């Protein structure tokens, strides 16, 4: 485990502290679960044509207890709006799949996978473009967060082997570059014009 990360590393896209929950798992199980969460974001990002800079598990001790979170950095000049939303939802979906695949699922553990910061980022990014996501309902002309998770679930199931490979590598190495993830999955990590010029 590392030292406590900087406060900025624990903020969401809007600068607010990300919610923390008890996982009801051991440290090792929680760390691997978070690796699956971040691998879900990273693999779907690549599958949808985003450039992934890096994806990592962040673990540290705090007041004699341990904590774990993660970060995935990706970008693209353009992306289909619902694919972006599904990529945001992929972390939670993948983490719940991990619990089921490894015989760890309970209602409490599944609830602990909820990532409001991912949902809120999808809502905030898509709203100015006129695409609405309802937290618990289907808005006119939009989708509910449950529908978005359903889209993510189908893609996660299709890419489960790649996600599992990345998650175990991330658990072992803590951080992976997008190029490393692309190499181990056979997916492309695109480079965009602005990145070439930089």
Image (cartoon, rainbow, N blue to C red):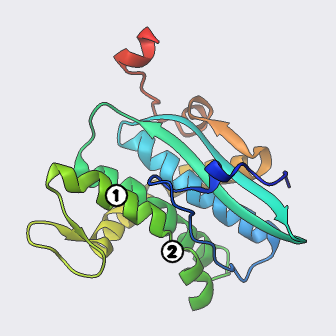
Disc 1 secondary structure class: helix
* Residue 161 visible in the snapshot: no
Nearer-the-camera pick, 36 or 159:
36
Nearer-the-camera pick, 96 or 124:
124
What's the residue at 25%, 53% (across, down)? 126
Q: Position of residue 143 (x, y in %)?
A: 20, 69
Q: Are marks 2 and 1 in contact (CB under 8 Å)?
A: no
Quarter assignment of residue 147: bottom left
53, above or below 159, in the image: above
Q: Which residue is mark 1?
A: 122
Q: Position of residue 16 (x, y in %)?
A: 51, 60
Check residue 156 in the rendering and tell me which mark sits there, or answer none: none
In the rendered image, the residue lying farthest to the left is 140
What's the residue at 41%, 57% (across, down)? 88
Q: Position of residue 144 (x, y in %)?
A: 25, 73
What's the residue at 35%, 42% (across, down)? 48
Q: Position of residue 12 (x, y in %)?
A: 51, 56
In the rendered image, the residue lying farthest to the top is 197
Q: Which one is earlier in the sequence, the residue at label 2 or at label 1?
A: 2
Q: Which residue is mark 2?
A: 114
Nearer-the-camera pick, 195 or 160:
195
What's the residue at 75%, 70% (across, down)? 29
118, above or below 97, in the image: above
Disc 2 secondary structure class: loop
98, above or below 130, in the image: below
* Residue 132 visible in the snapshot: yes
């Amino acid at each position: 485990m590392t030292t406590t990360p900087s406060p900025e590393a624990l903020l969401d896209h809007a600068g607010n502290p990300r919610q923390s929950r008890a996982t009801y798992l051991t440290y090792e199980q929680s760390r691997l679960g978070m690796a699956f969460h971040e691998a879900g974001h990273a693999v779907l990002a690549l599958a949808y044509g985003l450039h992934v800079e890096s994806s990592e598990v962040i673990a540290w001790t705090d007041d004699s207890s341990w904590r774990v979170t993660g970060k995935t950095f990706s970008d693209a000049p353009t992306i289909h709006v619902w694919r972006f939303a599904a990529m945001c939802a992929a972390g939670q979906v993948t983490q719940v799949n991990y619990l089921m695949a490894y015989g760890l699922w309970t209602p409490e553990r599944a609830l602990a996978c909820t990532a409001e910061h991912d949902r809120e980022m999808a809502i905030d990014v898509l709203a100015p473009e006129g695409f609405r996501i309802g937290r618990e309902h289907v808005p006119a002309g939009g989708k509910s967060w449950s529908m978005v998770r359903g889209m993510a679930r189908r893609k996660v199931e299709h890419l489960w082997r790649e996600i599992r490979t990345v998650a175990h590598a991330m658990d072992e190495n803590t951080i992976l570059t997008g190029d490393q993830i692309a190499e181990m999955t056979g997916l492309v990590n695109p480079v965009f014009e602005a990145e070439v010029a930089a």
